[in-house]
Amino acid sequence: MKIALMDSGIGLLAAAGAMRRLRPDADLVLSSDPGGMPWGPRTPEDLTARALDVARAAAAQRPDALIVACNTASVHALPTLRAELEPALPVIGTVPAIKPSAAGGGPVAIWATPATTGSPYQRGLIREFAGCVEVAEIPCPGLADAVEHADQAAIDRAVAAAAALTPRDVRSVVLGCTHYELVAERIRAALRERGLPPVTLHGSAGAVAAQALRRIGAAPAPSAQPAGSLTVLLDGHPGDLPPAALAYAEGRLLGAVAPVR
């Protein structure tokens, strides 16, 4: 079994780590666009073109499924990716975990990039899945970029700024960018330091990995052996995990397997 994941940068580590835990035997392909990131400020047309290039590089590795491990790319490029690659290659998008968060009752806060916060896409998800609870949309300028570069001081500043905007009565927080899941414990600590009661953080990585397995008719097998291989594609070319990836537990988990060249 081979699963490919794509993103502009290392935000795909969260879903890749979840897949590694669900199926340690799966061969993983990580395809990213370090020369073109970040994708958030790009026009939808430019983003879609770049996402297609990254997806085609991943598809050339003949995976069984492709996870679009990026909220922004899922919003703008998913229909185009599916039109080109499916049904031969199942393409699984990433959606902020607003539905399960709202199901636990409100109030709910959604941490997202400034481009996503208040967007018609996010507002539509709120209307569809969280219409009965109070929702606060929290922009997190600079957080994804800080996580991408493992800039610890910048991460602390961005997390603290978003925590300061988060209402004190929220019961759960949606991590609306895949990068944020890599610093979930730091987000939890910042909310606690601000005096909030324990909150539940909702990411998408686990659900996306599980959905990819369902799409190809595979079941989780956490104790499966032997460990699967890792292929890293940077701008379509074989490479290594970026050094910043090893700052996170998910990156170290994946880095335990030498990349296939």
Image: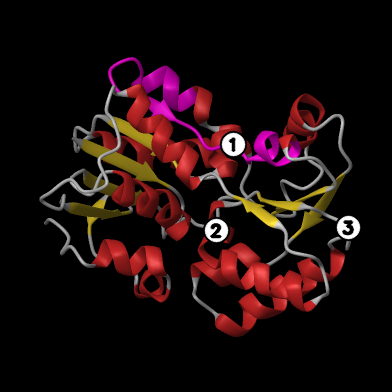
Say which label, 3 or 1, has the lower sequence index: 1
**Residue 165 on the magenta span:** no
The Cα atoms of the two marked residues, 3 and 1, are separated by: 24 Å
Q: What numbered label is drawn on residue 95?
A: 1
Q: Is residue 72 left or right of residue 113?
A: left
Q: Secondary structure at mark 3?
A: loop
Mark 3 and mark 2 in contact (Cβ < 8 Å)?
A: no
Picture coordinates of residue 160, whole percent (x, y) = 75, 75
Q: Is residue 132 left or right of residue 139?
A: right
Picture coordinates of residue 244, whole percent (x, y) = 41, 73
Q: Dot 3 corresponds to which residue?
A: 169
Q: Is residue 151 above or below residue 118?
A: below
The Cα atoms of the two marked residues, 1 and 2, are separated by: 13 Å
Image quadrant holding the N terminus, namely top left
Picture coordinates of residue 95, whole percent (x, y) = 59, 36
Mark 1 and mark 3 in contact (Cβ < 8 Å)?
A: no
Q: What type is the residue that disc 2 sits on? A: Glu
Residue located at (19% from left, 32% from top): 62
Q: Is residue 237 left or right of residue 118?
A: left
Q: Which residues are magenta?
A: 80-102
Q: What type is the residue that disc 1 sits on? A: Val
Q: Dot 2 corresponds to which residue?
A: 181
The reply to whether residue 32 is visible in this rendering is no
Say which label, 2 or 3, has the lower sequence index: 3
The reply to whether residue 203 is visible in this rendering is yes
Label 1 environment density (alpha carbons within 10 Å; few <14, some 14–19, many ≥20)? many
Q: Nearer the viewer, residue 99 or 80?
A: 99
Picture coordinates of residue 118, whole percent (x, y) = 82, 43
Q: What numbered label is drawn on residue 42?
A: none
Q: Secondary structure at mark 2?
A: helix
Label 3 environment density (alpha carbons within 10 Å; few <14, some 14–19, many ≥20)? some
Q: Is residue 9 left or right of residue 163?
A: left
